Amino acid sequence: MRFGWGRAAVLAVAMMALAACGRGGEGGPSLEDRAAAAAYFMESNARAEGIETLPSGVQYKILASGPARGVKPDGNDLVRVDYEGTLTDGRVFDSSFERGSPAVFHLDQVVPGWTEGLRNMRVGDEWLLYIPPELGYGERGAGGMIPPNSVLVFRVKLLDVAPIPGDAPTRGAAAAAV
């Protein structure tokens, strides 16, 4: 397979399929089964070559590095990225590469796993981000394309950062201001 996570993905999908067999397959795997498969994937992927894990549990693999002194976005900045989002089975659910147009957004407009991953990247970096369900769409899933409790896999290339003075307030800062 093309990515190091392929073996873990196959095992996670197999676990979900086996779990569904015991219930007649009517509604597919339960939320608990999906959560267990996601946890298994993340644990297995953490041991793959080149995978690093951030304190929150977001994992990444560096595909290409930008300049060592490149700009890193903070929580207040506008970023321009090219990306492709897939599930662990390789199904693509969104791709700016396919659209031929990079995405532009503030870091507070995306799931928390994206925000954390991008805050650690520099302009010119290209990473694979592995986002656990609790930092993605969690138990609700998204748009029928992303099932509940799915690990999200993103190939992200940080193209540019438009710095905005200051940083987005953290929960601690907001609580201290009250």
Image (spheres, helix red, strand yellow):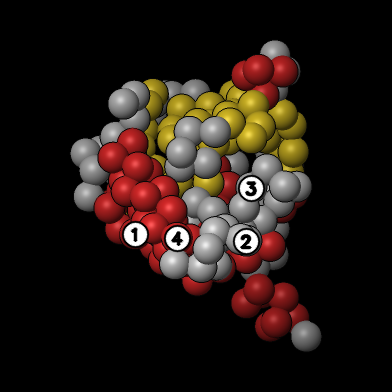
C-alpha gap between disc 2 and disc 3:
15 Å
Between residues 39 and 122, which one lies in front from this camera angle? 39
Task: Tell me whether the residue at label 2 lies in contact with that at label 1, contact meaning CB atoms closer than 8 angstroms.
Answer: no
Res. 60 image quadrant: top left
- Helix, strand or loop under label 3: loop
The first of marks 2 and 3 along the sequence is 2
Q: Are marks 2 and 3 in contact (CB under 8 Å)?
A: no
| Residue under numbered circle 4 | 21
> How many marks can you see?
4
Residue at the disc numbered 3: 146
Residue drawn at the location 54% of the way across and 54% of the way down: 150
In this rendering, the label closer to the viewer, 4 or 3 = 4
Q: Residue at x 43, y 24 (%)?
A: 66
Mark on residue 27? 2
The mark nearer the N terminus, 4 or 3, is 4
Name which of mark 3 and mark 1 comes first in the sequence: 1
Q: CA distance from mark 2 to mark 1?
A: 21 Å
Q: Tell me the residue that label 1 is attached to.
A: 40
